[in-house]
Image: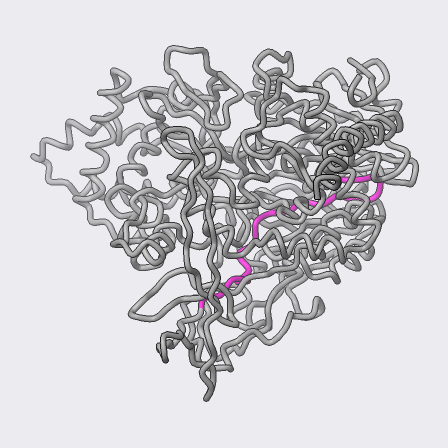
Amino acid sequence: MKTLLLALLVSTPALAADDVARWQAQAARVTITRDDWGIAHVHGRSDADAVFGMIYAQAEDDFPRVETNFINAQGRLAEAEGERAIWQDLRMKLFIDPADLKRQYVASPQWLKSLMVAWADGLNFYLHRHPAVKPRVITRFEPWMALAFSEGSIGGDIAGVSLGRLESFYNGTPLALNDVETGRVVPEPLGSNGIAIAPSHSANGHALLLINPHTSFFFRSEAQVSSDTGLNVYGASTWGQFFTYQGFNADIGWMHPTSVADVVDEFAETTRTVGGRIEYKFGNAWKPVTVKTIAVPYRGADGTMKTRSFTTWRTLHGPVVRSENGKWISVSLMDKPVAALQQSWLRTRAKDIAGYMKVGELRANSSNNTLLADRKGEIAFLYPQFVPKRDPRFDYSKPVDGSDPATAWQGETPLAQLPTVLTPKNGWVMNVNDAPWHAAGADSPRQADFPAYMAQIGANPRTPHAIRVLEATPKFTAASLLEAAYDPWLPAFADLVPTLVGAYDRLPAADPRRAALAGPIAALRGWDHRTGEASVPTALAVFWGDALVNRFGEAAKSDDEPVVPYLTKVPTDADRIAALSEAVARLTRQFGKWDIPWGEINRFQRLSGDLVQPFDDKAPSTPIGLGSAQWGALASFGSGPKPGTNRWYGTYGNSFVAVVEFGPQVKALAISAGGESGDPGSPHFADQVDRYRRHDFRTVYFTPEDLKGHVQREYHPGK
């Protein structure tokens, strides 16, 4: 035993030396070229070499965001942020088991393993070369960890499980929902815009693709990644992932808006306790509930590591996450990490839409629609490739009876049975996180041809906006497609403001509010419902809408209705006038007058690279004329007041945006919020802010000829 221990102690430094030698050898096969925006163009001999360099470059730009995404993905946030993150970690651990991921890694195809190994090696080499960087939790990355976060959506399916209800169930405490869960606060709508234009509707006969994700700012890294084996992809990757989530190669481009597809279901379980064992009913049988103890480590207030352990339960439907009306509620969602990572990588190598759809046969994309355009001139709208088959007799928008076998999932829907649009006659496809029934105008899939569970949510305020700008332009160029994407109309206020003006006009002549609100009403009456930095009516309408949400958001949530239609039909005249009085008073109190331009309130500010940004009214900031997707803005800028501020600062919405033209040689324009680097000392921390404000997109350097004259630095990782 003593001899074995000595051998292990002696061999450990040798193993570390072998690691370093392997990393250095791989780094020598990789070249990173930084352009004049700080964007990495990574080339490796093999795809694995390219992955090694890609993730190394990401770590150089923003290691804290790389690490945090994988802390979250493994349910380890409480190890960094303390007890308040326990419930988020428990939620993740109900669905993610490291031991299971390790087994799946071992069984993965060898080509995928090689990419996962290169990914872990690239991050570990970065930490080796930067000893001053102190990870919060993950001091050594392992290849299997890549499977914990294998699909690039900002939220993912797990995020739909309520943390408040989870805590109440597993902590045995009264239910305490947050303001978003109750509807008292309506957050910036999650999602994105995607538009593809066919050659028949483009001025020069080339297909066009708009890539317009709405995400948390600084959520993705922009890069080009290529190899000697034919990989050559450009676009945005979620920090820490080694595949390009939104982007293009020389032949095809893809955009992933969040889908409203129903791919997560809840089951109300009938349970009983027999001899100390909990059972649940399924058909005529009683099955034992699977019991598992989950330990959640967390950092205590004194800095020491502590652990809370939870006894958790699972049925054949999935883990139990809450109770309702005396019944346990379990959740079913997609669990295919290996297939998801394969699909996420392989689609970046597709040559056309047919090839992209063949990769989709893996059926491991559950949360996103896809907009496609290729060099052949084809365009397409695809629904998520993972949609469970169900019995259409049941309403899956609510928990269904888990004891009835007929409610259980019946496999996966074949791709041929999903709503799809391929090169429609109308010449365009789009999605703005709405149902597929609007994807291509008259050429859209017909809702009547599909089961009701396929899409439980219909249009949103961006739907009529997108259709209007697409139908208004018979022939698009890249420039006019961007102009359409930034069209400043706010259709929700086109519906809402007339209800306010009508309420004002119905006030009695002697009502003192007629005089008090005459100026604001005149501004709104003459407004064209278009946002802009200089627009006083925009600021007034947003503050009025905010006041209405404060009054009616909770009721809309309780009635399970979208907030804008609810605000259009439910508030009384008195409610609308009172909300305007409140908005005018708030504007005057905070800014000294009610007639203040929107750009004086709505700002972009980046003071630090912190994961949770600080904001300060006294520090420099940039006016932004964009509006919120909640009110139908296509170019979304989700802003609001922050602790200690009067001004509203954006944290969500247009982030990485690009327009791609598929001619004989692919061309693209792009912009990112802030800049590529998360380091405030970098020249690329905020070098795109002014362009972001003006929608002045920069040229993407995709070919070696494009890159000539724009090279800032060329090096091997570690040099």
> Does 406 lie within the magenta span?
no
How far from the left and from the top, in percent, is residue 28?
88, 25
For the question of whether residue 477 can be seen, the reply is: no
The quadrant of the image that shows the C terminus is top right
The residue most toward the bottom is: 284
Above or below, 265 against 114 in this view is below
Above or below, 112 against 649 in this view is below
* The image quarter in which residue 583 lies: top left
How far from the left and from the top, in percent, is residue 391?
53, 78
Relative side of 453 to 27, left or right: left
How far from the left and from the top, in percent, is residue 128?
71, 24
Q: Which residues are magenta?
A: 248-266
Which residue shows up at 52% across the image and 72% down it? 316
Relative side of 699 to 575, left or right: right
* The image quarter in which residue 382 lies: bottom right
How far from the left and from the top, in percent, is residue 593?
25, 18
Which residue shows up at 86% across the image and 32% down it? 44
* Nearer to the camera, 643 or 646: 643
* Nearer to the camera, 494 or 218: 218
> Does 265 lie within the magenta span?
yes
Display colour scheme: one colour
